[in-house]
């Protein structure tokens, strides 16, 4: 362990977050998502598991290190409910509230049709699969910029 790093974050997750640059996407998903099949097409090329975490606790841990993009209107995307596009599940509201609280600004989720979500996930940097049972626990987080002092 290291000081200041959430214990839910494995060395592999920290490594992935360090490799990502501004505008790169990170998929965080439940156990129902076809994560292993899609992960091979991502930049990282393999699935990263985050066992023992639900989606909200995993997102809290990840966002403790990774900022969300401020240059786009919706830095978090979610999968639409199939056959009920306008449905807003309680998980969607909790994810918005969590991201907004951590970022200190309102975050709205961009709903994507199921196959559009899968296509976007394939273009992501990496996929992190939680132990959350879902359903529809599929989100894409766009990494932002950290304003660091010069070295």
Image: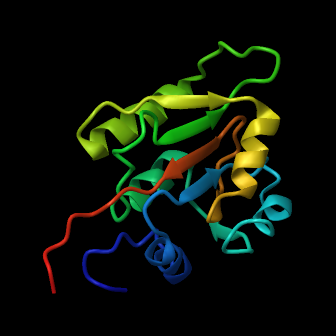
Residue at 53 percent across and 75 percent down: it is 16
**Residue at the extreme right of the image, as rendered:** 37
Residue at 44 percent across and 77 percent down: it is 18
Q: Classify residue 149 by image quadrant.
A: bottom left
Instruction: Say if 124 sits above or below 18 in the image.
Output: above
Instruction: Say if 93 sits above or below 138 in the image.
Output: above
Residue 52 appears left or right of 64: right
Residue 48 appears left or right of 98: right
x, y percent for residue 110? 55, 30
Name the one closer to the observer, 43 or 131.
43
x, y percent for residue 114? 78, 34
Residue 79 appears left or right of 20: right
Instruction: Say if 115 sits above or below 43 in the image.
Output: above
x, y percent for residue 56? 48, 46
Q: Classify residue 135 by image quadrant.
A: top right
The quarter of the image holding the C terminus is: bottom left
Residue at 38 percent across and 41 percent down: it is 99
Instruction: Say if 45 sits above or below 23 in the image.
Output: below
Name the one closer to the observer, 44 or 93.
44
Residue at 32 percent across and 60 percent down: it is 145
């Amino acid at each position: 362990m290291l000081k200041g790093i959430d214990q839910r974050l494995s060395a592999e997750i920290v490594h992935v977050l360090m490799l990502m640059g501004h505008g790169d996407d990170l998929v965080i998903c439940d156990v129902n998502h076809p994560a292993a099949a899609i992960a091979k097409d991502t930049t990282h090329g393999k699935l990263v598991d985050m066992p023992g975490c639900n989606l909200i606790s995993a997102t809290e841990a990840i966002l403790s290190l990774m900022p969300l993009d401020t240059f786009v209107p919706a830095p978090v995307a979610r999968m639409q409910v199939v056959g009920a596009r306008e449905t807003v599940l309680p998980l969607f509201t909790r994810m918005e509230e969590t991201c907004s609280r951590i970022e200190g600004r309102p975050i709205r989720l961009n709903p994507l049709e199921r196959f559009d979500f899968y296509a976007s996930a394939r273009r992501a940097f990496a996929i992190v699969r939680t132990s959350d049972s879902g359903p529809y626990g599929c989100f894409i987080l766009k990494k932002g910029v950290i304003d660091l002092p010069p070295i």
